[in-house]
Amino acid sequence: MGCEKSCAEIVNREVDTLHGIIKDQGIVTRLRRGEHLAQMGQPTNRVYLIENGIVAYTRSNQTGKRQVMEFELSGSLVLPLDALGSGSPCSTEVLSNTEVYMMPTKSFQRYLDAVPMAKDKVALQRENLIARVFRSFANIGSRQGPQKIAWLLAYLWERQGCVCGVDGASIPVRQIDLADATGVTSVYVNQILRKLEKQGIIALHKGAAQVIDLPALKASSKSFG
């Protein structure tokens, strides 16, 4: 895939430069839950922009149990976590029917080489992404199960609002994924979500949750009653 468009055309886009590159030059791909953008131990040679849906960075812990390390929502750029030629330190798993724009890393890199400001931005995004992924939700480690779930829902809701800017949208995350991100059992996650729904803090939909009262949800992350 050649660099048909000049640097000036890229820089002067009305849309975000990095996202515009992938949307204009990438290939739209539709994926189902359980498919992967990257596999742990395998080299990663593509960059993705999530148009809609949700993916997670996952790995197996010492006991072989699946661990969700971080989520990426609509509007997020999914960059390779591995160094050139090495294997990915974790898998990138599709959690719901998801549509992405895909671009080979080499093609994307050619654009970055032509636009130093964009290259610096991507380097910073990748650095921040690695920090987010490998903290493994350390901020919720000292909380009890109900507080962990409330914290994670508030975290995802604010991230989605920041990325998408859509009021009233739902978080397309399943209970098993919340469980694997927090170390809480799926049965207990269900009980916690039902209690939050009964309190009018969230609304549950099939495979998704909508935050109704964000301040109350944040308060629940500190003291769940």
Image: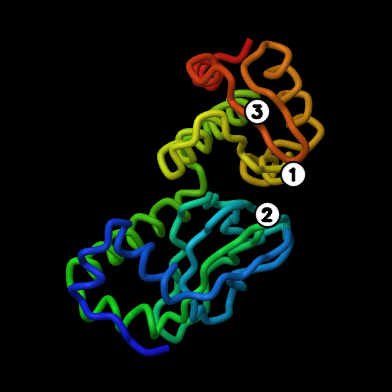
Looking at this view, is 69 or 97 the one in front? Answer: 97
Quarter of image, res 182:
top right
Q: Position of residue 10 (x, y in %)?
A: 26, 70
- Specify the amino acid type for callout 1: Ile
As measured in the structure, the alpha-carbon distance from the residue carrying label 2 to the one carrying label 1 is 10 Å
Residue at the (74%, 44%) spot, across then down: 176
Residue at the (38%, 54%) spot, across then down: 131
Residue topped by disc 1: 176
Q: Secondary structure at mark 3?
A: helix
Q: Position of residue 180 (x, y in %)?
A: 68, 46
Residue at the (65%, 28%) spot, across then down: 145
- Specify the amino acid type for callout 3: Gly
Q: Which quarter of the rendering shows the N terminus?
A: bottom left
**Contact? badges 3 and 2 (CB < 8 Å):** no
As measured in the structure, the alpha-carbon distance from the residue carrying label 1 to the one carrying label 3 is 14 Å
Q: Secondary structure at mark 1?
A: helix
* Mark before the other along the chain sequence, 1 or 3: 3
Q: Secondary structure at mark 2?
A: loop
- Specify the amino acid type for callout 2: Leu
| Label ID, residue 34 | none
Q: Which quarter of the rendering shows the C terminus?
A: top right
Which label lies toward us, 3 or 2?
2
Residue topped by disc 3: 145
Residue at the (76%, 37%) spot, across then down: 185
As measured in the structure, the alpha-carbon distance from the residue carrying label 3 to the one carrying label 2 is 22 Å
Q: Position of residue 151 (x, y in %)?
A: 53, 29
Residue topped by disc 2: 95
